[in-house]
Amino acid sequence: NNNEIIIFKTRGEYWQGCSSGGDSSKESSRCSTPVLDADRSDRLRDKMRKRIESGDHWFSLEFFPPRTASGAVNLISRFDRMGSGGPLFIDITWHPAGDPGSDKETSSMMIASTAVNYCGLESILHLTCCNQSKEKITAYLNKAKHLGLKNIMALRGDPVGSEWEDEEGGFNYAIDLVKHIRSEFDDYFDICVAGYPTGHPEAETYEADILHLKEKVDAGADFVISQLFFRADTFLKFVNDCRAIGIKCPIVPGVFPVQGYQSLRQLAKLSKLEVPEEITRVIEPIKDNDAAIRNFGIHQAVEMCRLLLDSGIVPGLHFYTLNREVATMEVLRQLGLWNEDPRRPLPWAMSAHPKRKVEDVRPIFWASRPKSYIYRTQDWDDFPNGRWGNSSSPAFGELNDYYLFYLKSKSSKEALLQMWGEELMNEQSVYEIFTCYITAQSNPCGHKVLCLPWNDEPLAPETNLLKDELEKVNRRGVLTINSQPNINGKPSTDPIVGWGPPGGYVFQKAYLEFFTSSENVTALLKILKKYEPRVNYHIVNVNGRNWTNANDMQPNAVTWGIFPGREIVQPTVVDPVSFMYWKDEAFALWIEQWAKLYEDESPSRMIVKYIHDNYFLVNLVDNDFPLENCLWQVIDDMFELLSEAQELLSDGAISE
Amino acid sequence: NNNEIIIFKTRGEYWQGCSSGGDSSKESSRCSTPVLDADRSDRLRDKMRKRIESGDHWFSLEFFPPRTASGAVNLISRFDRMGSGGPLFIDITWHPAGDPGSDKETSSMMIASTAVNYCGLESILHLTCCNQSKEKITAYLNKAKHLGLKNIMALRGDPVGSEWEDEEGGFNYAIDLVKHIRSEFDDYFDICVAGYPTGHPEAETYEADILHLKEKVDAGADFVISQLFFRADTFLKFVNDCRAIGIKCPIVPGVFPVQGYQSLRQLAKLSKLEVPEEITRVIEPIKDNDAAIRNFGIHQAVEMCRLLLDSGIVPGLHFYTLNREVATMEVLRQLGLWNEDPRRPLPWAMSAHPKRKVEDVRPIFWASRPKSYIYRTQDWDDFPNGRWGNSSSPAFGELNDYYLFYLKSKSSKEALLQMWGEELMNEQSVYEIFTCYITAQSNPCGHKVLCLPWNDEPLAPETNLLKDELEKVNRRGVLTINSQPNINGKPSTDPIVGWGPPGGYVFQKAYLEFFTSSENVTALLKILKKYEPRVNYHIVNVNGRNWTNANDMQPNAVTWGIFPGREIVQPTVVDPVSFMYWKDEAFALWIEQWAKLYEDESPSRMIVKYIHDNYFLVNLVDNDFPLENCLWQVIDDMFELLSEAQELLSDGAISE
């Protein structure tokens, strides 16, 4: 009878792949640490392979480094926005004239590092080798490795002079770079090389060029991205020709949606490609109408991409974005490749640095400043995994430079002054700004308050659930900077509070964090006694004077999820120790981002400084997640007690 | 205003005790791994100190080692029963004539080790030093340390001859042993010494004796347990005299409830104490009526204990149990010290070995055989803490000796044959035994089935929740050995399913584990496809042929709890790798505990062996804990499919 059983298709291979079977051998057959998202620890070529095997088309996006620091700030926000659409990877071109390997905020290296570390995007750094010494190239690669970059696009680059001359013992072709990477760094990097659907402009023949491509692949490249082309047939023929001579790795088409007349002409000249007559015929008559050209470009790119994908030999699409969003996003939307409903693997934005791949617990405090958290923990060797308390992590790094380009506000000083007030009258003026931010309404000068020093984005949809209550308390000087509602087992696919794989349930304890005056805190501490042990609190001022009822200083898990076939995931904790590091940052933001907008000694600056010096930072957790959130009642009780005390005093005045 | 705040009584000292304050110093100020029960990592003297400080009276229990192996089995069950009443510790006397330091199952050392490791009881091992070499004593202490014993009662012991002679360079008094322990093992052990409320019988004077006690304490003893006495006044005077000469450590009265005429006379003679006239006057007339004497003893002990506790200088009571349960439990009940509703810190029985103090995750498979799990993991260096997957534990030890005294069935071979059948007819006879165990009804021969090889105790109250369904499926050959209902957020204080500190919520995924025939498994595998991904399964036979849909072989958390101010606790997982070790044990129990009851080649033995050879062990988890448990539906569907297939076959027979 046992023999019959094997006729069922089973998933027993899971076990087989993990252990030698059912014998109780003495060695441990325990698998490595489970993670929520198995893909997270894959390298790019494995992710690509899995997508090809499953027939799931992907897209990727190419960007070039910006020229100015403010351009860098804008590009980083663009990474965040375009990253939400779900690219398999992005790539950053190498800009030899822009000091590409330096620590400048506009360098290719820094932009790629930011994309990986702070935006959590799988990224490829381009690298060109001509006119470079081996030592220099090795140094670039070491730096890239150190920064957490795992993928290199190996290119020759354009020679400096007009005449091309082989350099003895140097890098003359991309293949030399591929070989160098493999010989110096073994299998550490995934390597991509360029393919030319109509042959490299300098190649003797098309046939010689694809033979050269095969040599690059044989030397160790993992996949090919093609130069731009204008007709699907061109690319499909190219792929077939490559396959015919034995190139087996993925070959990805480089798609260029026409976005303007000038950029098209420039690119065609640069890549020595001729724009086909059917395109020039349409474009020439509308060359002064940017919108019309863009619409045509979108239409034309969608048509071409459909042909490519329908061919069955194109697994994904690579887009030359020219650092613009609209056209590429629209093409992807029309193709159904843009992820309109990005599922959050965890409630917070992950980093893609290899050493952070196991990280799945963070303190809640940096919820609106994830890049700052990543920056301040960049030197950690281990990251909390499974639970916060198990981690033997080092302390948080200082955050002295509030002007790091990935931390900088997206708004200009002028815009900030308009939002937060050219002139503050008193503490109430500050309460008003907070209230306007919560309600998304205009301040008295008619400007919407779209951000605060602690929140660079408008209110999260989840926080919006608390909007009415938040408005009420901010108006009265409970200046909220972070909060979450309680959740008692909503499906993990819930569009607002869901995260993690489908089929699970997510939970939260209600959380509220705010600045408030010492008078309020005096009353609050008295009120909180009534809420023991239901409510946990931490209260601290800028000098570190503090109160807490955190038992044994243990972290409190405030967000967790239960999933099929998994251990419990608890991505967010309120950790008493981390809170002391966070409070330094939270208080400093009053000065660094707000007070410094105003003249030294100006009344506005003094008001913000007074708050910084005298207010307390408070966090509250309602542990009883199945019941109605009691934190609003706590605040109400606090105001009630204050007004009773006020009455007592005024009675006293009368009786005297 | 800030100054006003400090007038509130706060709990800020928690923070102060943990870190140097709010400055963001570079060193990590992270506390050690959080645990659910902070007490768990305290040493005995600290637990005692905390109880004294909180005014919370405790009790402790003294036992002596048994003479026979079956006596050891009985004593271990007594530890489990009496441990549930909540003693602060138990102690095991040193029996020099019984090879006390050996590996014999009846030795003092082994009994104390079993109490600590397998019963999870804080335990003190007595040790006597007279007529022993220093090397021998050091070897005993090293062995005790290795076994996880942390507390020693340092005694002189009785000299071998009738004449006492000082031994040059040897141990002559308990104080020599105290000094030796402190000099050789520093502060590792907590040390207890004996006090004599009426002076040691060999002491020159009472005053000299308490001065001698002070020397023992000054030499490093942590607390004192008194020899028995008959009047509260005797002890209270003794404590006051001790305090007067500067003995500051806890002094615990040794209470001896009179349990019989002979034992009283014997003990009095041994300890050279005179039984007071008010006791002999009552006892002599009833000396042949054991029950009457015991009742008197209970009454008398309760009266005396009340006086002691009411004095305000007695923090706890130590009981000389003489290895009996009834009298001591009754005294403790009447005093209100017996814990009638033991709160489970975790769903499973913990070990008290120091290296297991962080352990808070286990596979569910050993739920009814916790001692076996502890035995098979005794060589691990680390224990899973917080999550199973993080542990880099070694593999499970073999379990070849099913006759280890702490694993042995409490029932005799005769009793087992009565329960499980003197003669089995067929597989159905086995189904019937399982069904009788579930329903707690008599088998066809009129004997109740109180245990099964996989369950040494009657059905747990929690499993009782599933009784009707379990009965139904066992009757049809789904032989269940482990199960739990789904729980969606019951209070942690729930009397049946609750565990952990109050104020929390506990959750479970429904779990079912059973043996069943390969025919059933064939149908089950087909049915399970309909339940993907809601139901996780593992199915394996004795040879290791297996099927599972456990994604990436990750463990599945099936019991977890959410508590105020804590990270999530998930004490029970279904771990695919451990299951393969468990299945060896689960299958072997058929042979070792059941088949071997019968003659070689006997039909009964062949029937059990057939099941062992041909049945599969199945475990099922219903991941959707908020919905109604679907596992019964899975089994129903399986039987439905089988009967449809049966019909098809019989139709076929007709049409042929």
Image (tube, coloured by chain):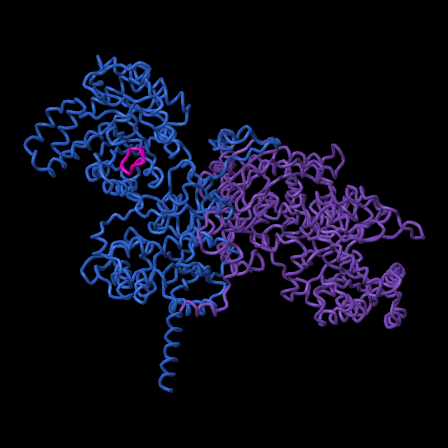
Chain colours: A purple, B blue
The residue closer to the viewer here, A255 or A476, is A255
Quadrant of the rendered image containing residue A63: bottom right
Q: Please state the horizontal and vertical placement of residue B122, each as a whole percent of the image.
A: 34, 35
Q: Please state the horizontal and vertical placement of residue B201, each as a whole percent of the image.
A: 20, 18
The residue closer to the viewer here, B372 or A246, is A246
Is residue A436 in view? no
Is residue B109 covered in magenta? Answer: yes
As drawn, the residue found furthest toward the left would be B285
As drawn, the residue found furthest toward the front would be B601
As drawn, the residue found furthest toward the bottom would be B655
Quadrant of the rendered image containing residue B235: top left
Which residue is painted at 88% across and 48% down in the image?
A167
Quadrant of the rendered image containing residue A590: top right
Q: Is residue B585 above or below residue B352?
A: below
Q: Which residues are magenta?
A: B102-111
- Relative to A106, B146 lies left or right: left
Is residue A346 covered in magenta? Answer: no
The residue closer to the viewer here, B490 or B445, is B445
Which part of the image, by quadrant, shows the N terminus of chain A?
bottom left
The residue closer to the viewer here, B493 or B479, is B479
Q: Please state the horizontal and vertical placement of residue A189, each as a whole percent of the image.
A: 71, 50
Q: Is residue B387 above or below residue A544?
A: below
Q: Please state the horizontal and vertical placement of residue B198, each as a whole percent of the image.
A: 21, 19
Q: Is residue A497 above or below residue A361?
A: below
- Relative to A216, B516 lies left or right: left
Q: What secondary structure do most residues of the magenta stretch adopt? A: loop
- Relative to B520, A296 lies left or right: right
